[in-house]
Image (cartoon, helix red, strand yellow):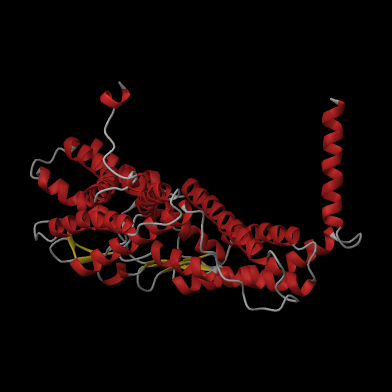
Amino acid sequence: MTQLMGRPILGLPSDLDSRSTLTDLLTGVRTALLTLSVVAAPVFGLWVLAPYGDDTAQDAARAVFGLWLLGHGAPLARGPQDAPLTVAPLLLTAVTAVLLSRAGHRQARRARGRGWVRWRSPLTVYAGYLLVAALAVAQCADPRALLHSRAVADLAAVALLAAAGLGHGLWSGLGRPWALPRLPLPPAYWPDGAGAAVGRALAGWLLALTAGGGAVFAVAVLLGSAGQDAQRLGGGAADWLGLLLACLLLVPNGLLWAASYALGVGFAVGTGGHAGPLGTRLGPGPDFPLLTLLPADRGPDWHLLACAAPLAAATATALLLGRAATRWTPAQTAAVAAATALAAIGPGLLAGYAAGGALGPGRMSELGPVPWQFALAQSAWLLAVALPGALLHRWWLGRHGDGAGPVIRARVGAYRLVCRLAA
C-alpha cells in the first residue's frame, strides 16, 4: 500500500535533493518580498490613517520601494528639486541583512550533506532577489515618485548587500570553511591561538563601544528636547506614527553617532557644523526630533564625561587580551593587542560610512561621522588603553609565576565542585 499511496520517486538517490531553477528563483523573490513587507506594512498602515486624500495607493507603493532601496544603502533623490538622500536607516539595513543571511544559511544546509555547494542554486536565488530590486528601481524612476532612484547606483547597492548577506549565510551554514590566513610573523611575536584572541577582543570592543554609545544616546534623549519637538511637529495619529517610525529606523544611526561623539572625534552636523565633547558648532537645520538631541554651541565642559564609554570598552578589551595572554610573553601580548587595534579600522570605516550621508543639498549634504576619523579614533583608544592594560592584566594574573592564571582558575573550579558536592 505504501508503494501505491506514496509519492513516486522519479530520480536517482543523488538527485533527490536537487531543486529546479524556477524554485531557486522564486526563493530569491520570496526573500526580497519578505524584506519588502517589513517596510510595506507600516507605510500602508500610515497611508490608511493619513487624512490626506491626494495620495494614491500607487504613491504609497512607490514610497515603500524607495524606503526599501534606501535600506540597502542606495542613494536616492527627493522631491522635484532632486535633493540628495543618502542616509540609510540602519535598522532596516540590519533586518534585511539578517533575512538574507538566513536565506543563504538555508541554501548551505541543503548542501551540507553533499559536502559541496551547487553554485547554480545560490546564484539563482541571488538573481531572484535582484529581479525585485530592478522592479523597485523601475517604480522609483517615475518622475511622480517622492523618492527618485538612480538606476546604476541603486542596483549596485542592492547587489552588494544581497551578496554580502547571502555569502555570510552560506559561509556560516557550511561551517566557516575558509578561515583567515595566519599572519606571517615569527612565533616570538605571534603565538598559537592569537588569531582567535584577536577575534574575541575585537568583538568585545565593538559590543562594548556600541553599548557605550547607547548609554550616551540614552542620556541625550533624557536631557534633550526631542519630546517637545515631536509634540510641535506631530498634528495627528498618522503624523505621530510616521515620526515614531522614522526615529526608530534611525536609532542605530544615532548609536553610531553617539559612539563617535564619545570617542572624541564627534560627527558632522551639516557643512561647517560639528558636534563633539570638545565643542559644538551648530547652524540652522531641519526640524527633526533626533537633531534636537544635540547640545547647544559651547566649548569643553561636562560633556567630556562621554569619553568614559570608550575608556570602559578599551578596558574590557584589555581584560580579554590579558586573560588570553597568561602563557604569552610581553612581546607577544603587545603584538596581539596592536593587531586588535589595526583590525578595528576596517569595521570603523564601514560603520562610519554607513551611519552618515546627506539629507538634502547645500548645508545638509554632510551628516554623521567622518569614516576615517571614526576608524582611527577606535584604533587610537585601543593602542592607548587596551595595549598597556593587557600587559598589566597579564602581569597581574602571572604575578605568582608562569601559568598562575590557569592555576587560579583550576582552584576556583575545584572549590565550586567541592561546594556542589557538599550541598
Q: Residue furthest top?
A: 1
Q: Nearer the viewer, residue 227 or 183?
A: 183
Q: Residue furthest right?
A: 400
Q: Nearer the viewer, residue 228 or 416?
A: 416
Residue 236 appears anywhere in the view: no
Q: Nearer the viewer, residue 132 or 205?
A: 132
Q: Is residue 187 above or below residue 127?
A: below
Seen in the image, is 151 located left or right of residue 348?
A: left
Q: Position of residue 45 (x, y in %)?
A: 22, 37
Classify the position of the N terminus by image quarter: top left
Q: Position of residue 324 (x, y in %)?
A: 73, 60
Query: Residue 196 appears in which quarter of the rendering?
Result: bottom right
Residue 336 appears anywhere in the view: yes
Q: Position of residue 285 (x, y in %)?
A: 32, 62
Q: Residue at x 84, y 47 (%)?
A: 410
Q: Residue at x 23, y 43 (%)?
A: 40
Seen in the image, is 240 located left or right of residue 407?
A: left
Q: Is residue 56 above or below residue 257?
A: above
Marks counted in the figure total 0
Q: Position of residue 400 (x, y in %)?
A: 91, 59
Q: Residue at x 62, y 75 (%)?
A: 183
Query: Residue 355 appears in which quarter of the rendering?
Result: bottom left
Classify the position of the C terminus by image quarter: top right
Seen in the image, is 62 located left or right of residue 283?
A: left
Seen in the image, is 49 located left or right of residue 144?
A: right
Q: Nearer the viewer, residue 371 or 343?
A: 343
